[in-house]
Image (cartoon, helix red, strand yellow):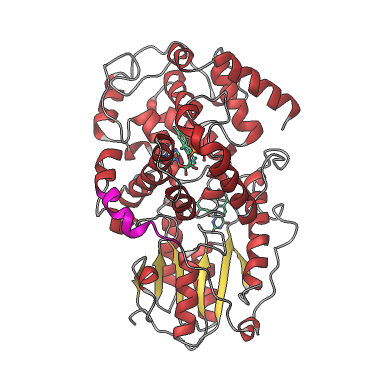
């Protein structure tokens, strides 16, 4: 089967993963990474395919019982976001069905039971998600397509290979942006009959207690899940934060970041929507710095996970850094902390402890602090391999935006020099870039940041 005719801006973001027997049943969008009704290229692809084939459109979301160390804080955020998506989709006569079980297999079997004509999935190179997709391709009898609804330039178009650095990736992506950084069409309502015979929207049991999600405390008060809150945050950032971003983003004591990552991670906000809105404002150093992070750094992380089989493991780090870390494996560490001491923020470094407490209590550590935080774990762990595992575990256990290619790339950068270059050689780090308290104190008011976290954590805002 070739894909049904789709409008050009949708078809060029979509690729056929598998051909198969196109049944006389519905077209299905298996929603996973991009959990939103608006600005969702994968949903648009499925809706246009359903209209072209004159078939109903169905949307599935498969609730995995456990996902990369996700806790109740994450499943709660996800669930509330999905509840809003269900309402937005129903307003367009599009039903959302929640499935439970092993996602790839469950989606394939459900589609088979409906004699589906086509399954559209959203692109996600995150290692655990790759295996879900493999299982779907084995289970689904109908054709399966994939739409990149997360990247502005689809990952397989941005580059055919793993990029060395932001510089090499930027040289490929920047010239493509005028063509790809466009507005995103609104999805048209499906005919009311599209709701006929659809399973009603419902969550299984007492969500998320029905999942084996560990509990990391109360839902976070400071952030509201879902598309509406994400759009509101983007509006406020454009109005009040963008112009300060360039100067303030590297000072964790200030509120200089966009704060968008939880919604971007769960797909409640389209990065293309955010970038398109910023590109409509007069270009400044600040807006350029923001787009560098939002487009180049973020899409470079997907490029890494897309083309590096071992992404998310120590073996996925660049050879030069594994070599230098190995050569310094026997260097004495100034101090060693086990994961419990780290998790409870009981080291002798008040800056590091503040960053850790910001993460465990708020679910979002400041971007600059994350670099310092991970690099100290390298310095305080018995081996670089253990440091990598510890940092990724804590990041994914507590960060709202964790369990993401950005986290894999961020920790691989901090501990293993991914997308970075060799620096002057020193103990433990070898030629991996080093950061220390003195460097932080030269950059910003460390005491102010520590006080800010102390007051945040005590009032548990
Ligand atoms: P802003 O500075 O406002 O950035 C806006 C958006 O740009 C972010 O939401 C993100 O999508 C993107 N972005 C910004 N910086 C980076 C970056 N360095 N790499 C990739 N994309 C970036 N980001 C995550 O989304 N999830 C993670 O688990 C994660 N773990 C990290 C771990 C370490 C050790 C490091 C050094 C960085 C990590 N990052 C991670 C990247 C970055 O720190 C966060 O994206 C950022 O702090 C999110 O907050 P914000 O949206 O307010 O940032
Ligand atoms: N994606 C799913 O399709 N089903 C899930 O049950 C699911 C749970 C989940 C929990 C926490 C979290 O941070 C992400 C989760 N995701 C889930 C994956 C997410 O949608 C992203 O695709 C990945 O995190 C990688 O980008």
Which quarter of the rendered picture does the N terminus lie within? bottom left
Q: Is residue 448 above or below residue 314?
A: above
**Left or right, residue 454 beside residue 238:** right
Q: Nearer the viewer, residue 90 or 61?
A: 90
Above or below — where is 246 with respect to 263? Answer: above
The quarter of the rendered structure image containing the C terminus is top right
Residue 317 in sight here: yes
Is 74 situated left or right of 153 in this image? Answer: right
Q: Quadrant of residue 215?
A: top right
User: How many numbered discs, if any?
Assistant: 0
Residue drawn at the location 35% of the way across and 77% of the way down: 19
What stretch of residues is rendered in magenta?
172-183
Q: Nearer the viewer, residue 339 or 195?
A: 195
Q: What residue is drawn where x is 62% and y is 26%?
A: 357
Residue 165 visible in the shown view: no
Predominant SS of the magenta segment: helix
**Is 30 situated above or below 234?**
below
Q: Is residue 192 above or below residue 300?
A: below
Residue 18, position as x, y percentages in the image: 35, 73
Residue 319 placement (x, y as % from top left): 25, 34
Q: Residue at 32% x, 55% y: name it.
A: 178
Quarter-of-image position of residue 196: bottom right
Q: At which x and y percent is residue 137?
A: 40, 69
**Residue 182 colored in magenta in the image:** yes
Judge left or right: residue 422 versus residue 96: left
Toward the viewer: 219 or 172?
Answer: 172
Q: Is residue 328 magenta?
A: no
Q: What residue occupies the far front of the structure in this picture? A: 282
Coordinates of residue 344 in the picture (x, y in percent): 63, 24
């Amino acid at each position: 089967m070739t894909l049904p005719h789709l409008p050009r801006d949708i078809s060029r973001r979509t690729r056929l993963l598998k051909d198969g027997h196109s049944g006389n049943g519905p077209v299905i969008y298996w929603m996973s990474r991009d959990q939103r009704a608006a600005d969702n290229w994968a949903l648009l692809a499925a809706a246009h395919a359903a209209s072209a084939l004159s078939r109903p459109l169905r949307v599935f979301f498969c609730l995995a019982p456990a996902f990369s160390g996700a806790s109740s804080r994450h499943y709660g955020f996800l669930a509330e976001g999905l509840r809003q998506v269900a309402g937005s989709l129903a307003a367009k006569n599009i039903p959302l069905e929640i499935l439970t079980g092993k996602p790839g297999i469950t989606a394939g079997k459900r589609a088979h039971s409906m004699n589906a004509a086509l399954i559209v999935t959203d692109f996600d190179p995150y290692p655990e998600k790759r295996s879900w997709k493999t299982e779907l391709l084995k289970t689904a009898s109908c054709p399966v397509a994939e739409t990149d609804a997360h990247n502005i330039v689809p990952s397989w178009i941005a580059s055919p290979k793993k990029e060395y650095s932001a510089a090499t990736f930027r040289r490929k992506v920047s010239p493509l942006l005028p063509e790809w950084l466009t507005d995103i069409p609104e999805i048209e309502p499906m005919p009311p009959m599209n709701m006929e015979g659809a399973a009603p929207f419902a969550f299984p049991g007492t969500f998320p207690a029905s999942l084996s999600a560990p509990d990391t405390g109360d839902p976070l008060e400071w952030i509201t899940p879902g598309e509406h809150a994400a759009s509101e945050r983007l509006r406020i950032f454009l109005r009040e934060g963008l112009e300060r971003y360039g100067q303030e983003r590297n000072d964790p004591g200030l509120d200089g970041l966009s704060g968008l990552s939880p919604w971007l991670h769960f797909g409640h906000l389209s990065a293309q929507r955010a970038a398109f809105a910023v590109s409509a404002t007069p270009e400044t150093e600040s807006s350029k710095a923001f787009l560098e992070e939002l487009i180049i750094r973020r899409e470079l992380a997907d490029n890494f996970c897309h083309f590096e089989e071992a992404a998310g493991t120590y073996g996925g780090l660049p050879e030069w850094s594994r070599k230098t870390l190995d050569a310094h494996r026997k260097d004495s560490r100034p101090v060693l902390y086990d994961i419990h001491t780290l998790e409870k923020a009981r080291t002798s470094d008040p800056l590091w402890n503040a960053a850790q407490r910001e993460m465990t209590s708020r679910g979002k550590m400041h971007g600059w602090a994350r670099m310092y935080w991970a690099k100290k774990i390298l310095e305080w762990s018995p081996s670089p391999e253990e440091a990598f595992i510890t940092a990724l575990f804590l990041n994914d256990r507590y960060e709202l935006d964790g369990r993401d290619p950005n986290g894999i790339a961020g920790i691989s950068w901090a501990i293993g020099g991914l997308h970075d270059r060799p620096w002057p050689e020193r103990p433990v780090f070898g030629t991996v870039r080093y950061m220390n308290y003195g460097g932080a104190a030269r950059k910003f008011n460390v005491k102010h940041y520590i006080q800010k976290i102390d007051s945040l954590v005590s009032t548990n805002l």
